[in-house]
Each structure stands twice: as structure tokens, then as C-alpha cells.
Amino acid sequence: MSSKSQKWGALFPGQGSQAVGMGRFLFDEFPVARQTFEEASDALKLDFKRLCFDGPESDLQLTENTQPALVLVSTATFRVINTTLGLDITAGAGHSVGEYAAVVAAGSISFEDALRSVRVRGQAMQKAVPVGQGGMVAVMGLSDDQVVRLCQWTEETSGLKPLEPANFNAPGQVVISGSQKAIEWLRENTETAKTEIFGSESPRMKLIPLSVSAPFHCSLMKPAEQEMALVLGATKFSNAAWPVVQNVTARETREGETLRSNLVRQVSGAVRWTQCMSRLKELGVTRSIEFGAGKVLAGLAKKIDSTTEAPLNINTLEDIKTLESTLSRTSH
């Protein structure tokens, strides 16, 4: 598609995209980024410059630190691009905690409120399940429906619960979440599962345990969801400037109350990322920008729809120059 007719989507990454050093080039080069880091440090009484640039990695990986740090870097990235180049966003979406950065960028909640909310979110998700009792596994090679059947079969056959789809990241790449005992049982009975569920047409299923601190986006997170209902219930939400396609519904909304309720539901609900990306395309988005650390969402986008141009990343000054030249072609 010609760049002259591009309609831009805004994407915001979630947990797993963090890395020591993230956001440093923005801080070094742009006053608005330095101001954003200062706002975050003041809001949470935490030295985000040290945390993001120097680590140590073990501190950055703590869920209660990771989540606000990601929202910070995504917000700083969005502000830099918006103030230096100007943007006309058609619609946006954020992956898990990235959805908070999306609603900040769309003007629905304040940056400070988002930071405070995700700090509590990280703490609540961490304490919802005792360490070692829950886990997450990437299931490769199955369709979304097949993964749902796999979880149901495991629960019914083993008597162990819960085991649920947590992240529909891309076709053939779904993360499941739940009881560590259920996960271990499934891993021990993988061949039986293939035979009993899929019969002679057994797919090439592969299970990859994930190194996570809690079983996110499953019903074990209900205590954290209840805590977030209180936190977000006391947070001011306005209607958004542009539609945000939300994780739990894969539908867009600008309405503040809907954004709020779906952010609450998201804590224990599945991230329907594949469906979110399809919905952005239906809304007319032809090219996206990944605002924040890493390139995870760009990688998933290629797997979801190889016919569209990959999202642009903003991890270096050169990336900003690439975006600038792309935008200039769009406007002429």
C-alpha cells in the first residue's frame, strides 16, 4: 500500500519486552522523555532512571517494577514521537499491561494514575498465587480452538484445575496458564493428549514452559482482579481521543467506563492479541508503530498477517529517522 494512504495504529508492548537499557536513548536526546522519567520517579518514589538503564536485571524483572517501567518507556516513546513528528492515530491496542499505556496515549487516564494502578496490579498479581503453585506454558502448533480443547481435556481427565488459554498471541502460538500441577500433568501426558483429543490427525504440538513469576490471565488471578476493581474504580477515566481495541473483547471503544471495566476483566481474562490485530485491520489500520521497548509485537504481527507491513519499532534514533521519512512520504 502507498504510504500516502497509510492509516496508523499505535501498539504498546507488555511484560517480556523489558530489557536493561530501555529508554536510555530517548532520555539522552529528548527533554520530553526526561520529563516523563521524572514524573514517573516522583509518582512512585522510585528511581526509574537507575532501574531502566542500570538494572540490575533482577530488579527490573520484578513484576511490580516491570509493569510501571514498561508503561513509562511506552509513554515516553509516544510523547517523543507525538511532539517531534506529530501523529494521526486511527486506533490502537496494548498487550496486557501495554493496554494501560494505550489508554494513557489515547488520553483516557493520566500517566500518574496509570503508573500507580499498574504498580498495584503487579503486586496484586504476584501475591494472588503462592510461588510455585501456578505457571504458564507456550503451546506451539495448535489452533486457538485446539488449545481450548486441550485445556478442557486436561482439567477433565486429570481433575486438576484451572488450566486456561491466557494469551492468543499469534496463529499456532498460544500461552496457557493455571495450576502448576495441571501443567506438569499435561507435560507428562502429552502423547496421550494428542491421541485422545486429535486422534490420527495429531498435530505437531510443542509445549514450552515459560519463566514467569505467576500464572497471569487465568482464573487464579481473581483476587488480583478484585483488587484492581477497587483501584480502577477510584481512578478518573475520560473518553479516549481514538479507539482502543481491548484485550478481553478484541473490540474497540473510546468510552471511559468501558475502558475501565475491560481493564479490570483483563487481569484474569485472556489476551486476545491475534483477534485485536485483525480488528485493527478491519478498522482501516494499514501500518502500526510499536511504542516501547523491544520488537515483540512486530514479530507477532508478521505471524498474524504476513500480507501487511510490519510495525515500525522505536528503539534507536535511526528508528525515529525511519519513521520521520515514512511519515513525510505519507503527507506529500
Image (spheres, rainbow, N blue to C red):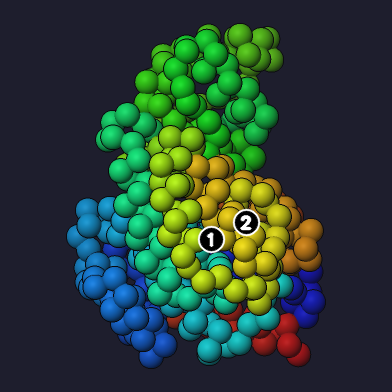
Query: In which quadrant of the rendered image does the C terminus lie?
Result: bottom right
Amino acid type indicated by mark 1: Glu
Q: Identify the residue under disc 1.
A: 99
Q: Residue at x 20, y 60 (%)?
A: 56
Q: Residue at x 28, y 53 (%)?
A: 62
Q: CA distance from mark 1 to mark 2?
A: 7 Å
Secondary structure under the numbered disc 1 in the rendered image: helix
Amino acid type indicated by mark 2: Gln
**Mark 1 vs 2: CB contact within 8 A:** yes
Q: Is 32 left or right of 271, judged from the image as shown?
A: left
Secondary structure under the numbered disc 2 in the rendered image: loop
Q: Is residue 132 above or below residue 53?
A: above
Nearer to me, 102 or 49:
102
| Residue 127 visible somewhere in the drawing | yes
Query: In which quadrant of the rendered image does the N terminus lie?
Result: bottom right
Residue 224: percent from the left, percent from the top?
A: 41, 46
Residue 107: percent from the left, percent from the top?
A: 57, 77
- The disc, 1 or 2, on the residue closer to the chain's N-terminal end is 1
Residue 49: percent from the left, percent from the top?
A: 26, 75
Nearer to me, 145 or 314:
145
Nearer to me, 254 or 34:
254
Residue 199: percent from the left, percent from the top?
A: 66, 10
Q: Residue at x 35, y 60 (%)?
A: 119
| Residue 289 visible somewhere in the drawing | no
Picture mark count:
2
Q: Residues within 10 Å of mark 1 (few under 14, many from 20)?
A: many
Q: Is residue 307 above or below residue 78?
A: above
Q: Residue at x 71, y 84 (%)?
A: 329
Q: Identify the residue under disc 2.
A: 246
Q: Residues within 10 Å of mark 2 (few under 14, many from 20)?
A: many
